Amino acid sequence: MTEVKFKRLALIGIGLIGSSIARAARKQGLAEEIVCAARTADSRRIAKELGVVDAAYESPVEAVKGADLVVLCTPVGTYAAIAEQIAPHLEQGAIVTDVGSVKGAVVKAIGPHIPEGVDFIPGHPVAGTEKSGPAAGFAELFINRWCILTPCDQASEAAVEKLGAFWAAMGSKVETMDPAHHDLVLAITSHIPHLIAYNIVGTADDLEDVTQSEVIKYSAGGFRDFTRIAASDPTMWRDVFLHNKEAVLEMLGRFTEDLAQLQRAIRWEDGETLFKIFSRTRAIRRQIIDAGQETPEPDFGRTHKSEE
Ligand code: NAP
């Protein structure tokens, strides 16, 4: 594995992902100094109290001064303005990356602001929880999880290798991909599942003939797992859908067609079709477990406490 050590790591945003990077980078000794910028005084105070950063600034400009690795960890909708603000203050030779859950829109938002002599490499750790804020992070978040880098022509090979080594040192498996392909893959594996969860929980909330207390009481029937996903941060997910509109709409079209097929099979009591579809999907679950991306334990290996 390539040896990796940065002089100053600047995290712009110190929520779940930013503070997990801070913790993992510190634990693995990947930076001499770790600083962050956070918009609210509360987040700056908590990050300092938890000891995950050496310094916390209100202004991203202060954080990036002297930094050789800058990671944008705020909602995707904030990227363009932050990139414009920090651009004149970036060190020559620095690497700028991000953790946004969409990539095509990020290339457009950040790319044009990056000056000559700075490497820009969009990135996405495919790891997270439904929790938010600096206290929600943990150093093990990225272990055995994929981190997808979508390098364009604004980065040298050496910089891509160095950033890949940084993620690998935090426990990630690293893959490079074209930004448009990333957005399509993530639309079906992450964005549509979140949309379905938000929708089903919203529908249950609107029902008139089933009481709220019944929804909660019998939630172990499947609904509970949707509520965990639907508890994810509204700002982050609003930005994901606004910035991956085309891929999400494309996948949503496919999903709607398949749903209509299920609807038809139920209407016509076509048990054979239902059985065939449900058997195929069971095999996919098996493959996810075999790939080490999930545990076979009941309740998906989650304790009931983490679902509170
Ligand atoms: P989070 O816990 O809510 O943290 C967001 C951070 O961004 C906080 O430091 C917050 O500052 C700051 N922020 C929010 N709105 C801002 C604004 N308008 N201007 C400046 N700063 C702002 O979110 P997160 O889960 O870490 O997500 C951050 C990024 O990671 C997103 O781009 C998301 O797409 C990506 N991501 C998330 C997950 C996941 O599962 N959560 C997984 C992979 C990638 P304050 O605390 O001071 O308000």
Image (tube, grey):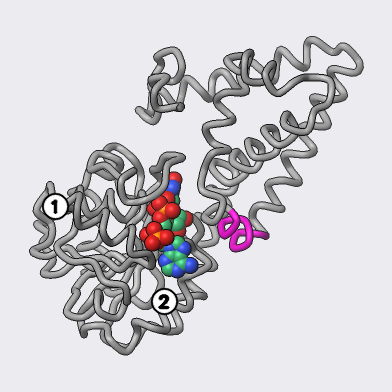
Seen from the viewer's position, the closer of residues 100 and 59 is 59
Q: Left or right of 154: which side holds 31?
A: left
Q: Main secondary structure of the magenta part?
A: helix
Q: Position of residue 81 (x, y in %)?
A: 47, 78
Q: Nearer the viewer, residue 50 or 301?
A: 50
Left or right: residue 290 compared with residue 160 = right
- Dot 1 falls on a residue whose secondary structure is helix
Residue 130 visible (yes or no): yes
User: Which is nearer the eye, 230 or 169?
Assistant: 230
Residue at 48% across, 70% down? 78
Q: Residue visible at 85% across and 13% down?
A: 270
Residue linked to disc 1: 26
Q: Which residue is mark 2?
A: 82
Number of callouts in the render? 2
The residue positioned 25% from the left and 55% from the top of the image is 47
Q: What amino acid is at disc 1?
A: Arg
Residue 193 x/y as whole percent: 60, 38
User: Horizontal placement of 24 versus 131: left or right?
Assistant: left
Residue shown at the point (40%, 14%) measured from the top left: 297
Task: State the residue lying farthest toward the right.
Answer: 268
